[in-house]
Image (cartoon, grey):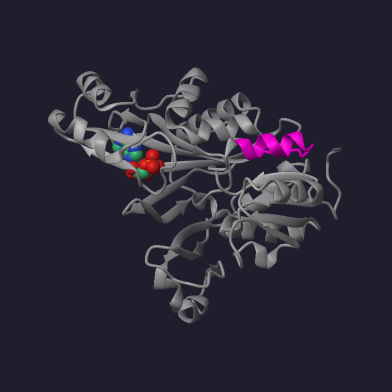
Amino acid sequence: MSFPLPPGSTIGILGGGQLGRMLALAAARLGLDIAILTPDEDTPASRVAKTTFVAPYDDAEALAALAAASDVVTFEFENVPAKVVETLTRLGAEVAPGAKALAVAQDRVDEKSFLNAAGVATVDFQAVNSASEAVVAIGRIGVPALLKTRRDGYDGKGQRWIRDAADAEAAFEALAAPCILEAPAAFVRELSMVAARGRDGAMAAYPLAENHHENGVLRRTLAPAVASAATEAAAIAIAERILVGLDYVGVIAVELFELADGTLLVNEIAPRVHNTGHWTKDGCVTDQFEQHIRAVAGWPLGETTPLARVEMTNLLGEEADAWQTLAAEPGALIHLYGKRRAVPGRKMGHINRLKPL
Ligand code: AMP
């Protein structure tokens, strides 16, 4: 494969959700086509893609078809089985970001071990593979502490606070999976750094975003976050260590805890475009979706300069039914994902409310 991919090339995406949809819309603007592989019919992404293969992610025939149709393959969620990337690579497909980024992001113990080895601070942690190991880990880390499944957790699912050492075994048994025990982060704010690395090794970072969650789900992002130059610089340095350490190509999101003394700890990384970067769609010269397409296609990275101060609010469940009112709001840009059914808490869209910088 020779990069940069010229207009008319096809980018394959594993996953058919709203992130795939917004990547496809960005690719279209650059004259690039999209092929989707998704297990579901009628997904948000497939309705704006050139081609869709509907099959399980590990379906050999579908992977061969995706590899044949695509000049490069990327993904819109991090729980793509490692075997799928191996298969695509064996078929001669170029996959970005690569297998290492996926492996690290899929396992919370491997993730924190990688981060610490790369010189990036996290909370203290310990792997917990049994109820008795939970007791030992609580003995060292103390209470309160947060027990999380190593794999497959999202939006705060698969987590239990242990507030009394006597509850350690029961907490492990309730999660019933290999776990990580984390010391509590006494954070004052949750921030995120969305950044990108191109095929030539060039890196670009967006301004920090401040994130507010409700019931474990992102509710609002305020960006650019009000942060000191030192905090911005520290976040950029963290992102760069991660991008280089993973030999990364594409957009990455780094979720951060800001402590009272200004220290930044990394909570987790997402090897993809991210909900906390949706503000860039209307708030920056180049948004995160176009940036990811540029990176994986070997194009030069775009400018990340902010154009506006944005409050991004997720539209969950039936909130998107108010689309007529929201669409009439001055200074606001509504994004709807075209999902057919509003389930309570489901991300149906978001709205970016713009103010001057
Ligand atoms: P996660 O699934 O790791 O993103 O965690 C979901 C949310 O739980 C985070 O956004 C934090 O609000 C909170 N959280 C996660 N880990 C910790 C921790 N070690 N200490 C305190 N809060 C945490």
Determine if the magenta segment contains residue 18.
Answer: no
Q: Position of residue 125 (x, y in %)?
A: 34, 24
The residue lying at 41 percent from left, 49 percent from top is: 211
Question: How many numbered dots are placed on residues in this image?
Answer: 0
Q: Would residue 160 be found to the left or right of residue 263 on screen? A: left
**Is residue 85 part of the magenta span, yes or no?**
yes
Q: Position of residue 144 (x, y in %)?
A: 20, 32
Which image quadrant shows ligand 1? top left
Note whether 218 is above or below 4 in the view shown.
below
* The N terminus lies in quadrant: top right
In this rendering, position of residue 307 left or right of residue 225: right
- Of residues 104 and 119, the one nearer the viewer is 104
Q: Nearer the viewer, residue 119 or 103?
A: 103
Point out residue 127 in the picture as x, y percentages from the top left corner.
Answer: 36, 24
Q: Percent position (x, y) of residue 150?
A: 40, 33
Which of 19 and 177 lies nearest the eye of the viewer? 177
Q: What residue sits 46% from the left and 21% below the top?
A: 116
Residue 185, placed above or below residue 142: below
The answer to whether residue 152 is visible is: yes
In the image, is 222 to the left or to the right of 290?
left
Which residue is more in the foreground, 270 or 43?
43
| Rendered residue at 38%/53% (across/down) | 217
Q: Which residues are magenta?
A: 83-97
